Amino acid sequence: MLEDVPGWLGKALRNVRAGHAKLAIARLGDEGILHRDGFVLRSAAFDQGEELDPSFTADEEDAVAPPLEWTAPPAGAAELVLIVEDADSPTAEPFCHWLVWGLAAQQGKLLEGEAPPRVGKNAFGNSEWLLPDPPADHEPHDYVFQLFAVDRPLPLLPGATRADVLAAMEGHVVGAAVLTGTYGRSDEDDLGWDEDDGG
């Protein structure tokens, strides 16, 4: 429900919906860490709240993850963690599209399709960028890119789950930045999405 979305998070997002309350940032963040010290996440491929190009989604056969870049994190950061979740998935937990950690705690970027240092399991149990594939009869989904600065390297092996990553980050987040891309599909584009899946 909308009242479960923290007010500070609602201000940072467009078109706030109940699903935003399930995001990692809602669990791990607070008003004091979001965009702390000017920590910002951007993409050359889309602006905040804009639609993702099909080249980053299940609508194109050779699709890859979009490019991302970020400013220097707040003082005390030892590592950066990226979590991308579908806020509109009709599932108990957000549908996790990408779990990345081991990023250097400095200004940096991931190029389009670049393989990150450490990748965990997405909602389908694969260690890769899970291509957005929302059902055709849904309004466009919000894909929320959440970049966290943590004060210690995460003691995790590649292939860790979302639950593993969130547990390792608990109490160690010193900064966070969010960027939302949207994506929806027409009936003609439907690739057989199942209601039991996310998006």
Image (cartoon, rainbow, N blue to C red):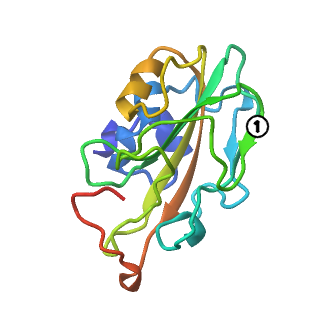
| Residue at (22% x, 63% y) in the render | 195
Foreground residue, 149 or 9?
Answer: 149
Residue found at the very far left of the displayed protein:
196
Quarter-wise, where is residue 72 in the image? top right
| Residue at (47% x, 42% y) in the render | 10
At label 1, which amino acid type do we have?
Answer: Gly
Foreground residue, 105 or 16?
Answer: 105
Position of residue 181 relative to residue 60, above or below, is above
Foreground residue, 7 or 138?
Answer: 138
| Residue 140 percent coordinates (x, y) | 43, 67
Quarter-wise, where is residue 177 in the image? top right
Query: 39 left or right of 178?
Result: right
- Looking at the rendered image, the quarter that the N terminus falls into is top left
Label 1 sits on a secondary structure element that is strand
Quarter-wise, where is residue 109 in the image? top right
Residue 70 in view in this figure: no
Residue occupied by mark 1: 108
Position of residue 142 relative to residue 168, above or below, is below
Query: 52 left or right of 132?
Result: right
Residue found at the very far bottom of the displayed protein:
188
| Residue 167 percent coordinates (x, y) | 39, 21
| Residue 29 percent coordinates (x, y) | 49, 27
Q: How many marks?
A: 1
| Residue 180 percent coordinates (x, y) | 55, 52
| Residue at (69% x, 38% y) in the render | 40
Query: 51 left or right of 126?
Result: right
Residue 43 in view in this figure: yes
- Looking at the rendered image, the quarter that the C terminus falls into is bottom left
Position of residue 6 relative to residue 37, above or below, is below
Q: Residues within 10 Å of mark 1 (few under 14, many from 20)?
A: some
